[in-house]
Image: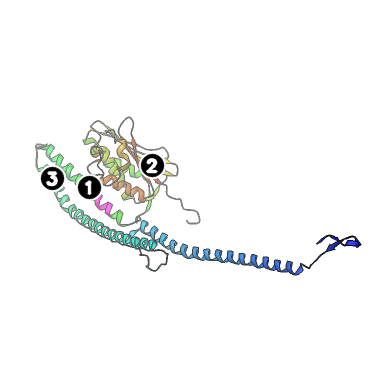
Amino acid sequence: MEGPVDLGARGKGTLQVGFRTARLEDRLREIAAEGVQAGVTAFLALAMGAWIIGMFAGERIGRVVSRIEILAADPGRFRPLRAGLGLGGDEVSRLAEAFNRMGASLKAETSRRRELEAEKQELSAMLVHDLKTPLTVIRSGITLLADLADEGGQRRHARTFELLEMSTARLQRMVEDVLQLAKLEETSSLQNLHRVDVLSLAKDCSTDFELVVADRKQKLELRLPDEAPPPVLGDSALLRRVLDNLVHNAVEHTPAGGVISIGVLRDGEGVTVSVCDSGPGVPVSARADIFRKFFQKDVKRHVGNVGLGLALCAKVVARHGGKIGIGDAKPKGARFYFTLPAAIEPSPADV
């Protein structure tokens, strides 16, 4: 630093004052470095603490989320949360306790329902199986009595015997449908799989129903393609049952003089089989649920009594990897159809 100074007789001069700042500057730099280091250390400590807390809490919360997902998917697999999860906070502990109570209740209820369902299915199967023998005896007895009632080639009480035969035949079909449904629901896969010719299946079904439609003064048409569709891989007995049920429904709900048709055609990589009738058809509002068991909403006069036959059809087609549906026939009536994937041709290396 410098400034003017009056020196009296000597005149004026300049005073200069100086001191060294090197040590001060060095100290200031040391203080700054220590401050930065302390700040960085504090930041790293906070970040590390947050990471550890996040990992700890995240792991615990992840366990809770996984348990909730298991509970939602299958209450029977529920496992309670441990009391010492250390999620932190009284509220979280209360939430875990409430979750455990809810899960235990749902698990107990699910187990009880499954036990009741198993008992119900077992009882139904036993009852239905026991009905088969007396039904067969009753049906044979009705046929015998009808033959004995013939006088001079003319049957007395012909309408009564006809109603008895129709009722016992319908009841027998229902019993067989229940048994077949129970068998399908017991297993997740089909056993007797082989290549099935759908054209032969349709021809055999048409032949078997010829006398039935003739007796009802109906007409049965078989609409087949010029080129044979590919075979399908499936259980021929079950697929024939599907076709029989659909044709039987068509016969039941087609008036005298009406037409029933069985159609087969190639549909892309699969085969579509359709059964059309000229009856009243099925309301659009009921079609979404018509293949459900025991569904009767405004369709009893369209598809039978309890819908077991259609439920069986849907189950069999689904087990074959196919799709079943319903639409409108032309000019009127209902069109039931199902599509099955074609059997995969073996490669030369597999032959």
- The structure residue drawn at horizontal position 26% and vertical position 60%, both measured from the top left corner, is 112
Are the residues tagged 2 and 1 within 8 Å (C-beta)? no
Amino acid type at mark 1 = Met
Q: Secondary structure at mark 1?
A: helix
Residue 160 horizontal side relative to residue 11, left or right:
left
Residue 154, given in percent of the width and then of the height, sits at: 11, 36
- The structure residue drawn at horizontal position 20% and vertical position 44%, both measured from the top left corner, is 170
Amino acid type at mark 3 = Ile
Please report whichever mark, 2 or 1, sits nearer to the chain's N-terminal start: 1
Are the residues tagged 3 and 1 within 8 Å (C-beta)? no
Distance from label 2 to label 3 (Cα)?
39 Å
Q: How many marks?
A: 3
Amino acid type at mark 2 = Thr
Mark 2 neighbour density, 10 Å: few (under 14) some (14–19) many (20 or more): many
Residue 124, given in percent of the width and then of the height, sits at: 21, 54
Residue 220 drawn in magenta: no
Residue on which disc 3 sits: 142
Residue on which disc 1 sits: 174
Per the rendered image, the range of residues in magenta is: 175-182
Please report whichever mark, 3 or 1, sits nearer to the chain's N-terminal start: 3
Which of the two residues, 147 or 73, is positioned nearer the viewer here? Answer: 73
Up the image or down, 237 lies above or below 30; here it is above
Question: Closer to the camera: disc 2 or disc 3?
Answer: 2
Residue 346, given in percent of the width and then of the height, sits at: 46, 53
Residue on which disc 2 sits: 272
| Helix, strand or loop for the magenta stretch, by majority | helix
Instruction: Tell me where residue 91 sits by quadrant.
Output: bottom left
